[in-house]
Amino acid sequence: MTGLSIKSVFQPTVLLALALMAVIVMMILPVPAWMLDVGLAASFALAILIFTITLFIDRPLDFSAFPTILLASLMLRLALNVSSTKLIIGEGHTGADAAGEVIEGFANFIIGGNVLLGLVVFLVLLIVNFLVITKGAARMAEVGARFALDAMPGKQLAIDSDMSAGAISHHEAKERREREQQETTFFGSLDGASKFVKGDAVAGLLITLLNFLVGLVIGIAMHDMPIGQAFETYTILTIGDGLVTQIPAVIISIAAALLLARGGNKGATDLAISEQIGRHPRALATVAVLMGLFALVPGLPFVPFLLGGVGLAALAFASHRSRVLSAASPAEDTAPAIAPVRSMGDILELDDIHVEFAPDLVNMVLDPGVGLEARITNMRQYIATTYGIILSDIRLTDDPGMPPGSYLIRIQGVERARAFLRDNHVLALDPEHYPSLAPGETVKEPVYGAPARWIPASEQDRAALCGVTLVAPPEVLATHLLEVIRRNLSRLLTMKAMRRLLDEMVNLSDKGRSEANRKLL
């Protein structure tokens, strides 16, 4: 057979297809007990692997295959449930080892000879998984999917602002847009996959109940087992089977909840928790004092509370010392630098694009570092490389007759857009999704018309910690201007602009091509 080799068989795609086919076969054909043991061990390993990965990833999107793996693990557990049901009902009369050593071992280890204890443990795991973890994870997935979809316009605006300011390139902007799309798709898939997890918990209860009742009837009626022996044997088998399948289900449900609870936090889970708790040494010290007081209460154990108080006091001291040392070190300026001005040729001095603004915005617009004037060159370079049009000079003038904070954009003398800015404020996008956001003037951002709110710049750090998308006033103006230019490119492509573009083509070519182009043009 041409083209077939051992290396091609062991490709990840082929192995995944073979594994899924093996799971389907387990649902149809009888499976020996040793093979069921292998499948149950694989289910445990997969659940622990998923849980460990969710702890170590930097952000939820780094594990974008989680919904697919979640469904694959669910499919594996259902296949194992079907196979164990066949062995319990068909071979249960032979003894407690009829369904394999894994089920028997778990039953004996956890039950410890007490059937009622095993039943209670199984029900507790089922209730915790179904009513607490799965239900909460499903709600978080639903809210996360809705918020991710609602926040897309604001995030697109932030990307456009960074690109127009020259902070990121066109390629980086494209990557960020793709990442935002992947995040929306990821939360949507996870929302759907959480419904399967909820159904898996219900199926586990029904399968366990069915195994016990049907197995008990078959053992007594068809195999003449004494009632006591049949009750003990099938209880061990069904409780062991339920525990072996429910424990991986609980682990995966916790992993899903941890992944969804990460939100916008970056870094591994342990680092995020330790960093954020370490910011509040006074809270740690308060709890340490309370633990010490509990140790002195008569009737309560002294050593556990004392050790807890001492440990928390040590953490509070270390956290406070770390904060003092970090505050003493100079902070680095992480603001993106404006790209240097690059010549684009002898651009004609035309007022094709004119931005007028109120006098109180002069310092903001003409700031040599982050103002609009510093961003115009990058904006013109982006338009030239993306759309092939060389823009004329963008005229910036102040108008004393305009209301404070307002500006307007004219294209060839015609007003095309008008909005306003607030100095010493930042624009928070999608404010209704963040109830703790500082109060301010509620508006619609000028580019996409999404809801926004001007909040004081002093509240910027606190809002950023909540995950709010914030846009500075110069970025709002630059993004608005870029969008207006995009919408009016047909008006800006005049005969003079075409002549300037053709002249640039000739000037940038070599001498031989230059002569040929001049004769042609």
Image (cartoon, rainbow, N blue to C red):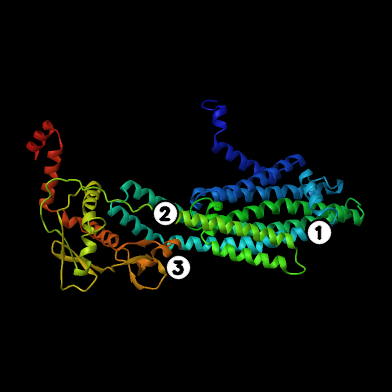
Q: Distance between the Cα atoms at labels 1 and 3?
A: 46 Å
Residue 253 bears which disc, if any? none
Nearest the viewer among 341 and 134 is 341
How many neighbours does mark 2 have within 10 angstroms: few (below 14), some (14-19), or many (20 or more)? some
Query: Could you tell me residue 181's position as x and y percent?
Result: 42, 53
Nearest the viewer among 282 and 67 is 282
Nearest the viewer among 261 and 31 is 261
Instruction: Determine the residue located farthest toward the top in the rendered image.
Output: 2
Q: Which residue is mark 1?
A: 117
* Image quadrant in which you'd find residue 359: bottom left
Q: Is residue 129 visible?
A: no
Kindly state the secondary structure of the residue where label 2 is placed.
Answer: helix
Instruction: Determine the residue located farthest toward the left in the rendered image.
Output: 519
Please identify, in this view, whether the residue under mark 1 or under mark 3 is nearer the observer. 3
| Residue at 31% across, 57% down | 161
Q: Amino acid at mark 3?
A: Tyr
Kindly state the secondary structure of the residue where label 3 is placed.
Answer: loop
Q: Distance between the Cα atoms at labels 1 and 2?
A: 49 Å
Query: Could you tell me residue 113's position as x and y percent?
Result: 85, 53
